[in-house]
Amino acid sequence: MTGKNAQDETITWQTGHCYLGEILVACTSQGVCAVLPGDSVEELTADLARRFPNACFAHANNSRAEWFSSVMSYLIDSRKPLTAQLDLRGTDFQCKVWQALQEIPSGSSSTYGDIARRMGMPTASRAVAGACAANPLAVVVPCHRVLRGDGSLSGYRWGVKRKQAVLSHEQGLSER
């Protein structure tokens, strides 16, 4: 879905904790619109408000909500399919990149250039990197699985340490 402003839309959010630290999961009537890792609930709610400046926010305070428990289960084991509906909001190009990222299996990786080539835009690796940086759905839209052409880690919206943590976690799952 494109269009970011969420004018007068209610976004319900809930926080939890996992190996990435605090996690905020937010949901609209269309599906999960944000999965944000961070160090504190205050930091995460401020990030959510910046991303959706025209929305109304409601704290769910319900760890049993299907959309929340689905995302938290996925964070534990990304080999299992995510059952929650997603509400992806970005430009058409960003949404295409995010769709391509979801095709990279857990425990695997790709490069910005590979993603650009698969999309039929071989010179768009920088634009792919920009779309990865704009991704509001950490781990669920697996931008952490995209590496530099030389295989090294590059920047990650939530920090290279978290990127390494997710990759290590997924690698451990695939070795089981």
Image: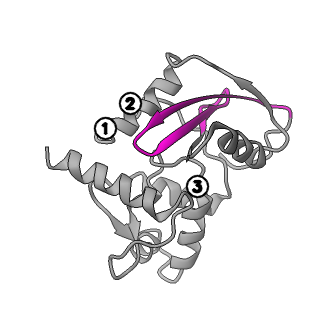
Q: Is residue 153 above or below residue 22?
A: below
Percent across and percent down for residue 52 are 77, 44
28 falls in the magenta region: yes
Our reading of the magenta stretch's main secondary structure is: strand
Q: Is residue 58 above or below residue 159?
A: above
Percent across and percent down for residue 6 are 79, 39
The residue drawn where x is 61% and y is 41% is 40
> If the image is split into quadrants, where does the N terminus sit?
top right
Residue 77, visible in the rendered structure: yes
Q: Which mark is residue 77?
A: 1
- Three-letter code for the amino acid on which mark 2 is drawn: Ser
Q: Residues within 10 Å of mark 1 (few under 14, many from 20)?
A: some
Near-viewer residue (137 or 81):
137
Residue occupied by mark 3: 135
Find the distance from the CA under tag 1 to the CA under tag 2: 6 Å
Find the distance from the CA under tag 3 to the CA under tag 1: 20 Å
Near-viewer residue (10 or 36):
36
Residue 100, visible in the rendered structure: no
Residue occupied by mark 2: 73
Magenta part of the protein: which range?
A: 8-33
The residue drawn where x is 32% and y is 76% is 151
Q: Are marks 1 and 2 in contact (CB under 8 Å)?
A: yes
- Three-letter code for the amino acid on which mark 1 is drawn: Asp
Give the SS element for disc 2. Answer: helix
Horizontal side of residue 28 vs 83, given as left or right:
right
Q: Residues within 10 Å of mark 3 (few under 14, many from 20)?
A: many
Q: Residues within 10 Å of mark 2 (few under 14, many from 20)?
A: some
Near-viewer residue (161 or 26):
161
Give the SS element for disc 1. Answer: loop
Near-viewer residue (25 or 29):
25
Find the distance from the CA under tag 3 to the CA under tag 2: 20 Å
